Amino acid sequence: MKIDPRHLEILAAIVDHGGLTEGASALGKSQPSVSRSLSMLEERLGIALFEPNRRPLQPTEFCHRLAEEGRKIRAAGATASTVVQQFKGGLRGAVRVAGSPFFIDGVVSPIIASFQSEYPDIHINQSYGYARDVIDMITNGTLDVGIVPIRSSEIPPHIEARQILPGRNVIACRIGHPLARKSSVRLSEIAQYPWIAPPPDSPLYHDLRAVLDGIGMRDFKVSFSGGSLASVTAVLASSDSLTVLPYSVVYMLRRQNALSALSIRIGDPDRHLCILAAKSTAGSSATDKLVKFVKAEFASLNELMQRREQNSLWRS
Amino acid sequence: MKIDPRHLEILAAIVDHGGLTEGASALGKSQPSVSRSLSMLEERLGIALFEPNRRPLQPTEFCHRLAEEGRKIRAAGATASTVVQQFKGGLRGAVRVAGSPFFIDGVVSPIIASFQSEYPDIHINQSYGYARDVIDMITNGTLDVGIVPIRSSEIPPHIEARQILPGRNVIACRIGHPLARKSSVRLSEIAQYPWIAPPPDSPLYHDLRAVLDGIGMRDFKVSFSGGSLASVTAVLASSDSLTVLPYSVVYMLRRQNALSALSIRIGDPDRHLCILAAKSTAGSSATDKLVKFVKAEFASLNELMQRREQNSLWRS
DNA sequence: CAATCTTCATAACTCTATGTTATGTAGTGT
DNA sequence: ACACTACATAACATAGAGTTATGAAGATTG
């Protein structure tokens, strides 16, 4: 027999709050109203929900079982409320953005800073996530915009994606690194230096492995592993270590006199940086504004980077 | 803002069935009723749930999101229905029995063993409990059958009780006890022997106190207290201790050459052994079969015991 | 493009469940 | 034994959902 889901929520509230009066209050209902609803439910079920003659109410095993379902209903209701708030709040100047940590820290954050000075009333909520997580969050509505390197075959049909940079990696090092001033770097010269590995679960780590496999290095010396872009940059800047980073990230950091890159061409990944958003018309004008702005900034950045051959750029 | 969980279920049904009319039918609701509920919901939310001017209704992304929560609520409701059926249907092939420990161990277990050899497909779940607990468990549906000594005034109206043995206690001892072979035992003879007391929270303990008060013994020497029927029997068998036990229990144990009883009449309790079950129609045929079997076995046992005068029985 | 069919919206009436305040009953603690 | 707490019940009002009947609008077909 079908039970009204509100009644299951009532049972959950009573069990979780240890009594009818407290449970009713938690639900915003009056104590007599809840009491009567329970009595009618017990009469319909023909099975006791609470031990008789006990104060406060002591649930039976049967009640506990139904209360468990009531908790699930309550959780679903809470999620629905969040969805409502998101769809309303999304219309009112808040955008949630996520992306690969190094891209977010190295490239996207400065762009978003520019966006916010131009649109001060739009709030940006920024977080990290790789492609798979970003897609999930956009799909379930907890994210508005994702900026991640991704293969086009990995983009599901309900998500709108636009490539903003081609996949391009370089071997990064500190400014003034012994190899940095060489116009041509040979394999044997790289082998003697230690490497910094990105977080093992990141696509960049796989890029690193691919690069080193391509160069023929089976075992490489890792002097530092994991960490944020800032910590990687700090380690690079204070040692002769090498790592693999996206070209755009190094380019942006070069502006800060932070990093340089070696004059050696390494294989580019087939994942291109894309900006992702849901295809639905629920996209807010704030989200639309941000997407447009980010596309324009990356177009500009791409143009700047293309004006410089990789090798000639790093020879200054 | 909180959404009525029934409305979330409605959204799920509409989305899953491809239209309002089909969805309403799936929920057992009328089409106009669902249409109006939806209109009122959209008005309260202030966000469109369906693309305008489309037939059949085409959900928005917002609606899809809420429908997902509706599915969770529907699933929880289905599980709750299953729980209800289990608590009702659990009475179909499995019977839960509880009673006073000494009766259960000494008399009821052998009867249930006979029952199960006759009905091997009926599962018996056996446990202990005194009258008050047994009544509570039957009331709240966690027990099917209780076998306990009880006064008829203690039986609530919603429970069906049938007396299966009159209240009758004897002073039990080991076979070969010095007093066991006497045809008439006097008070002064009893006083010198130690006593075994049943668990203090048991009605039998109160019976023991009542017996000793009636005999005029204010302070009696307790050499062993509490424990199961097996442990009490073991202590009796290996010492000259005495205790008070129900006549039927001793009778059953006598068959095993385990115990004997003194030839002295002591006051009988006003609690008679009864078999209890809920009056509700939820009683299964398995429960009915067990109740009938237990009644018959106890009638037979009662007849056997009545064929023997108490004193002549113990004189063999 | 018009006619027909399908799907949903609206109206009017009825009924049920839930809201309220007031008060009684029963269990628990001191 | 008394006071307090927690729940049950009564009476009245209201809102939401049930119904049948019917209209409006979108989609399909000839």
Image: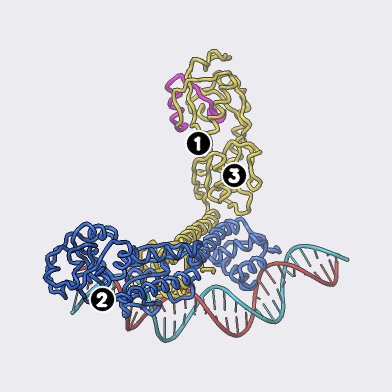
Chain colours: A yellow, B blue, C red, D cyan
Badge nearest the viewer, 2 or 3: 2
Question: In the rendering, which numbered label is found on residue A101?
Answer: 1
Q: Amino acid at mark 3?
A: Val
Q: Amino acid at mark 1?
A: Pro
Q: Is residue A260 magenta?
A: no
Q: Residues within 10 Å of mark 3 (few under 14, many from 20)?
A: some
Taking depth in this image into account, of A43 and A100 the one nearest to the observer is A43
Label 2 and label 1 in one chain: no
The image shows residue A124 at horizontal and vertical percentages of: 50, 46
Q: Is residue A63 left or right of residue B208?
A: right
Label 1 marks a residue whose chain is: A
Label 2 marks a residue whose chain is: B
Q: Residues within 10 Å of mark 1 (few under 14, many from 20)?
A: many
The residues bearing labels 3 and 1 have C-alpha atoms spaced at a distance of 19 Å
The local secondary structure at tag 1 comes to: helix
Taking depth in this image into account, of A22 and B60 the one nearest to the observer is A22
- Tell me the residue at 28%/74% (across/down): B168
Q: Amino acid at mark 2?
A: Pro
The residues bearing labels 2 and 3 have C-alpha atoms spaced at a distance of 87 Å
Tell whether label 3 touches label 2 (CB within 8 Å): no
The local secondary structure at tag 2 comes to: loop
Residue named by callout 2: B269
